[in-house]
Image (cartoon, rainbow, N blue to C red):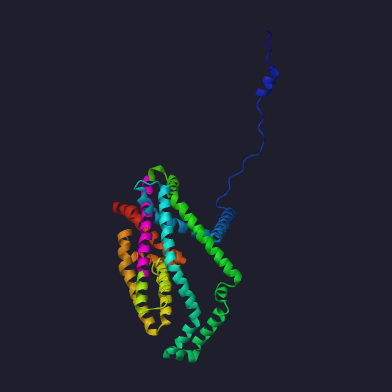
Amino acid sequence: MAIRKPNLNIIKKAAAPKKPVDLGTAGAPLDHGHPFYFGFLATAGALISLTFLRALAGASQVFVLIVISLFFAAGLNPAVEFFQRRGMKRGAAVGAIVAIVLTVVGLFSWIVIPPMIDQINLFVKNAPELVSSLKNNATINNLNQHFGIVDALQKKINSSIHDGQFVVSAFGGVVGVGKAVLSGAFALLTLLVLTLYFTASLPQVTNVAYRLVPISRRARVAGLSDAIIARVGAFVASQATVAVIAGIFALILGSILRVPYTTPVAVLVFLCGLVPLVGHFLGCTVFTLVSLTKSPLTAVIVFVAYVIYVQVENYVLMPKIMKKSLSMPGLVTILAAMLGTSLLGPVGGLLAVPVAAAVMLILEEVVFPKQNLA
């Protein structure tokens, strides 16, 4: 068999190195102290920051829903872990919590909502007569004769309620009513779905977040983060307890004084009680106005009793509950709720106290020990 000799010309051609392409000589590096360089970087940074802030502003509602969902998920986590400690898997424990919540909401709706709707309809129907009854008080009647306040209010109510335009005008027309209903339903559904997802996958979410931390500090960060989540759950349970106490107080007080529409007012006080400190301003206002339809004396009694209860809640109940569940001084609880509400409204008031609890935990576990060793 003949052996073919290799073609040396092809080998030499393939082995021949390519000549480098002349791309020019590298110039001097940029002068970081040159005004143009500084101005370019400053302008680019400002544009990027402005674009980022506009994007955040445009998606602010989504971020609020995500934050509230995480807050509720952290609040439900202790209940989920309670079932997990008794042998249930995470998914089954979340399903049990959801079933319990839906059962409670269903019973609440079945017991409270029908009489509340009847009383609200009766209140709307009798609103003109109730406003007219304010003239029976000599002081209010004197003010009405000089300024026409009651007459103007009664005229507005008659033209709105009797024509069926009260709700429509309150939301800016028929389109406004539709948008308000759809946006509220969509936000509520989104909040519910996100809360369920975050509750079910909270361990996975936290584990992924912990992997972003260097392994030398991962155990420490994980321990602090788990403690913060536990404090958020304790705060949710504590705030719900305080809100239930406020609703029971309003129900008992309204029943004793025979205030009309006691049930819907007590429900409103309960919902307002979920927002620390400032939520009671709305509850007290509505409770007092409804009591005024019976008599000025009843309204005064309700207002004074509600103010006394709020002071007891703020300076006795809340500090004790928060100190026991969150290990926070009462003054820090009050200041955090006031600052959070002033900055971000009701959402800020709801999130301020657990954020303050997290800051206090970091101070106690990280900052103060370092200062003691300095």
The x and y percentages for residue 353 are 38, 62
Who's the residue at 31% across and 71% down the image? 312
Q: Does the rendering let one see residue 63?
A: no
In the drawing, does residue 291 fall left or right of residue 156?
left
Q: Please determine whether, in this image, residue 182 is positioned above or below residue 374.
A: below
Who's the residue at 42% across and 55% down the image? 99
Who's the residue at 45% across and 86% down the image? 134
The x and y percentages for residue 325 are 32, 59
Who's the residue at 41% across and 76% down the image? 287
Check if residue 29 falls in the magenta segment: no
The x and y percentages for residue 234 are 35, 58
Q: Main secondary structure of the magenta part?
A: helix
Please state, as top left, top right, bottom left or bottom right, where the N terminus lies in the image: top right
Q: What is the span of residues highlighted in magenta in the rendered image?
A: 219-247
Q: Please determine whether, in this image, residue 33 is positioned above or below residue 57.
A: above
Q: Please determine whether, in this image, residue 94 is positioned above or below residue 271.
A: above
Which residue in the rendered view is the most extreme toward the top? Answer: 1
Res 181 quadrant in image: bottom right
In the drawing, does residue 18 fall left or right of residue 228?
right
Check if residue 225 falls in the magenta segment: yes
Q: Please determine whether, in this image, residue 357 is positioned above or below residue 7.
A: below
Task: Please tell me which residue lies in front, 92 or 312.
Answer: 92
